[in-house]
Image (tube, rainbow, N blue to C red):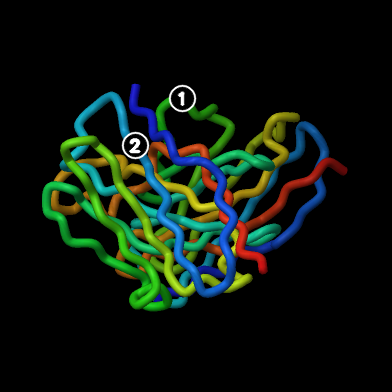
Amino acid sequence: QVQLVQSGAEVRKPGSSVKVSCKASGGTFSSYAINWVRQAPGQGLEWMGGIIPIFGTANYAQKFQDKVTITADESTSTVYVEVSSLKSDDTAVYYCARALRSGYRSSFTPFHFWGQGTLVTVSS
Amino acid sequence: DIQLTQSPSFLSASVGDRVTITCRASQGVSNFLAWYQQKPRKAPKLLIYAASTLQSGVPSRFSGSGSGTEFTLTISSLQPEDFASYYCQQLNSYPLTFGGGTTVEIK
């Protein structure tokens, strides 16, 4: 069974950055898209971007294009999201989620397996 | 960007009720639409994909329909464990977007 285990909660000051990890186990890693979704307190779900590790290139929502970097390390089956220039409205739970299907169209398949979420709090 | 508008945003229902949630897309997404259920402090769970395909293990009281710009999620007989928030998501084009969510609460 596929499991995604995320790194622990983080507290950061405004203007700093944070890097959250998502380690996959069970199943094939490299050919499935891993996406990052965030959820601000009491709010809905927001797709930030995703990556198919075997291809290496990430795709981002325009809003996050210059703010977020998604990378993958195939040797450890881990995907990372780094969020820079943090502001208070970046306070949210950040989820990673693996796609249902593999291959070059993986990015356009639903999010089947989810990590447990990582709370990032931005506060001075 | 494709906007997804869910309605209602909140509904109050009783156990055994039939519940329908609508998701409207600002432009056509064919059948590249999924539905998720989220309970408080938990990650979302995939219920339905390709507009009407039930994900393995999901109870048959959940069903989805629609194509193009209008979609529905129906729960045929609401159970206590179904009280949660529900989100639609389009997977037709970047950026992948979610609807604003529908919270189903106990009447």
Image location (x, y in percent) of residue B43: 54, 41
Name the outermost residue toward the top.
A1
The amino acid beneath tag 1 is Gly
Chain of the residue under the numbered disc 2 shown in the image: A
Please tell me whether mark 2 sits on a helix, a strand or a loop.
strand
The answer to whether residue B90 is left or right of residue A26 is: right
Task: Examine the image and state in which quarter residue B52 appears.
Answer: top left
Question: Which residue is nearer to you in this view: B93 or B24?
Answer: B93
Which of the image's four quarters has the N terminus of chain A? Answer: top left
Q: Is residue B105 above or below residue A19?
A: above
Residue sitting at 38 percent across and 45 percent down?
A: A21
Image location (x, y in percent) of residue B31: 35, 57
Question: Which residue is nearer to you in this view: B56 or A6?
Answer: A6
Which residue in the structure is indicated by mark 1?
A: B57
Residue sitting at 42 percent across and 34 percent down?
A: A5
Which residue in the structure is indicated by mark 2?
A: A23
Image location (x, y in percent) of residue A36: 40, 54
The amino acid beneath tag 2 is Lys
Question: Which residue is nearer to you in this view: A77 or B21?
Answer: A77
Q: Is the same chain shared between marks 2 and 1?
A: no
Residue sitting at 70 percent across and 30 percent down?
A: B81
